[in-house]
Image (cartoon, coloured by chain):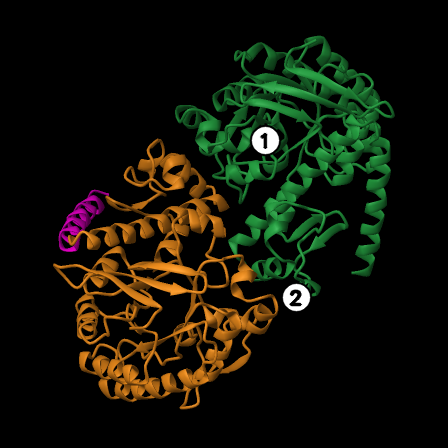
Chain colours: A green, B orange
Amino acid sequence: MPDHFRLLHQDTGCRARTGRITTPHGEIQTPIFMPVGTSASVKAMRPENLKDAGAQIILSNTYHLYLRPGHRLVEQMGGLHKFMAWDRPILTDSGGFQVYSLTELRKISEEGVKFRSHIDGSMHLLTPELSIKIQESLGADIIMCFDECPPAEADREYVERSLAMTTRWAQRCKDAHSRSDQLLFGIVQGGRFAELRQRSLQELQEIGFDGYALGGLSVGETKPVMHEVMDACSDLLPPDHPRYIMGIGTPEDLVEAVWRGYDMFDCVMPTRNARNGMLFTSQGRLNIKRKQYEDDQGPIDPTCDCYVCRTYSRSYLRHLFRSGEILSSMLNTHHNIAWYLNLMARMREAITQDRFEAFRKEFYHQQQSETENHKEE
Amino acid sequence: MPDHFRLLHQDTGCRARTGRITTPHGEIQTPIFMPVGTSASVKAMRPENLKDAGAQIILSNTYHLYLRPGHRLVEQMGGLHKFMAWDRPILTDSGGFQVYSLTELRKISEEGVKFRSHIDGSMHLLTPELSIKIQESLGADIIMCFDECPPAEADREYVERSLAMTTRWAQRCKDAHSRSDQLLFGIVQGGRFAELRQRSLQELQEIGFDGYALGGLSVGETKPVMHEVMDACSDLLPPDHPRYIMGIGTPEDLVEAVWRGYDMFDCVMPTRNARNGMLFTSQGRLNIKRKQYEDDQGPIDPTCDCYVCRTYSRSYLRHLFRSGEILSSMLNTHHNIAWYLNLMARMREAITQDRFEAFRKEFYHQQQSETENHKEE
């Protein structure tokens, strides 16, 4: 049993579980959601706002920080924690996903991926070794292996070859990793093919990592396929290691993943949607732009006790959004992050009380009223 | 002696003075700078950030709030303080200046000003009575008379006719004003003509207001003209009433105005410049974009103890600016407001110790090193 993860409680009615990850910057209670701080900032949030919203760990992007301001500069400034004044845990991704999703020109070879920067058009070669080097310079508590992330529509033959290379890259990442104060997670690929996912997972486990992540989900596949992949892996994953599904998701995705025994998640949805005026509530999603909120003195969500819901009316938040005020992004982001993190806290509590199955049913009941709510609107 | 203003100390060496304004939302120590919250938000700042930066009072714009979200809505939501969750004093301007500076189509008559909204092109007629009605609905602690603000290049004849009408409008404002919990300030016009300024002031005093403001400065006139206008009025202003110069200014403008016995100021400079990466320091202005700050681990201003200077490096702030992060505007704004308010606090302290003249000399010595600094850059 590794000492960085402790399985605290296994729900007696389903695969959902609570746990605790220990890092040099503190402990993380799982299941947990990680707000995304792409360029060394969770957009529109100060570190103390993140803490107030309940953030235990944030994610930052290797691809972005490598290009700007550069990992060497961040290292010279004392590492990512000091640079951005965030003293709790950080996870960095490997840059893999961004290379495939943000750059147009890329050439994949056994050595690594050649790509053109989306910022200044310069050419770069990202390899497993360089990804680890960058992540060591940034100094996150949890770092990720460099992987190939095939498109959702890739055929089985492509995915099979790709995951074999991802396994070889994972070995190279492990060999290259030298910082003992960082946890290194492997990334399971295999696209929509359950059997390939299982093969990938098995190969990664043979190498041995501090945690295991599912990559390449929420890239356009259907929900049944997403759930099938989660199911295909969850029984094979070692119970004494943290399990992370990268890049998901909606509140429903999180509930489904926790129900299947997964522990960690990240997604830009709560932060990006906030800036577009889409807010999460216990009654479903709410678009703050709508005329109906013009003179609404109530909070975003009457059941939410976050700073924003305690302080501001929907009427004011609508005014800020329509006026293009920066404060609109600040307050909307704060609420959405707090709401996501509160959802995770409620899930942890339900698991501890062996009633996650009931929680899930109740949650879907609310989602139904959300759907009705949407119809009304 | 009115009970809303107490002159606390008159510097023995110059006209600078400290005082205290009492309002329903608390006291204001003068001389004071008021951060500008145009559309019911000081851009990129939460109310508690403003308090942390030392804000005692903020200004909000009648013109903007009248057009969006509308003064009746703000009133229905419980007034501006409640709407924006700011429980300290607020001053609203009359809408006069914005009507002249932001709208293209306007027709000035004895009745008022007809103008086209810069938001949706709709036509409006703003009169002294409507301006007061709007400001009563918003519920600020200090409200302003509706005035005509002639352009800097207007000739004497125009300005003379204009100020006569501004006086008649001031009387109409006083007659229309019915809320006893608001202070009503008159606005001295008269352009660059010292004699006309004095006439305007005398006429306003005959009507009688809770405070007196100089309007129409910092609209393109030279510094000597600005100072001449300040001088022309400062000996005629009643010492037992607060004196406000609207829309200034640079740190130098504030020092010059305080030295001449003025008490209150507002300007978008610290907030707008912050969003453009221009930061105020004891060594002069600093452009955070500059390459030289790339690996600068120091704070914006080593002599500043604001939240931003205690927490972040120039290197990080440069990164945020270059990355277009919202946090850049948030942190830069916080620093600039804190720096301005700290400048005011230092001025109050110097006056209390009868050493404002020495303070002013020292300040200009620093400004010289700033100029040299600019040359180097």
Q: Give the x, y percent position of residue B85.
A: 53, 57
Q: Is residue A2 above or below residue B72?
A: above
**How would you rate the neighbour count of disc 1 (Cα within 10 Å): few for under 14, some for 14-19, many for 20 or more?**
many
Frontmost residue, A9 versus A34: A9
Q: Secondary structure at mark 1?
A: strand
2 vs 1, front mark: 2
Q: Give the x, y percent position of residue B332.
A: 40, 46
Relative placement, left or right, of B235 versus B3 is left
Q: Which residue is pictured at 57% across the width and 70% down the height?
A: B75
- Magenta span of residues: B356-377
Q: Is residue B261 magenta?
A: no
**How would you rate the neighbour count of disc 2 (Cα within 10 Å): few for under 14, some for 14-19, many for 20 or more?**
some
Q: Is residue B368 magenta?
A: yes
According to the image, label 2 marks what residue?
Answer: A295
Residue type, mark 1 in image: Leu
Residue type, mark 2 in image: Asp
Q: Secondary structure at mark 2?
A: loop
Q: Is residue B336 above or below residue B33?
A: above
The chief SS type of the magenta part is helix
According to the image, label 1 marks what residue?
Answer: A59
| Label 2 vs 1, first from the N-terminus | 1
Q: Are marks 2 and 1 in contact (CB under 8 Å)?
A: no
Mark 2 belongs to chain? A
Q: Is residue A188 visible?
A: no
Frontmost residue, B320 versus B166: B166
Q: Give the x, y percent position of residue B69.
A: 57, 68
Q: Which residue is pictured at 60% across the width and 57% down the height?
A: A317
Q: Is residue B258 visible?
A: yes
Relative placement, left or right, of B182 versus B162 is right
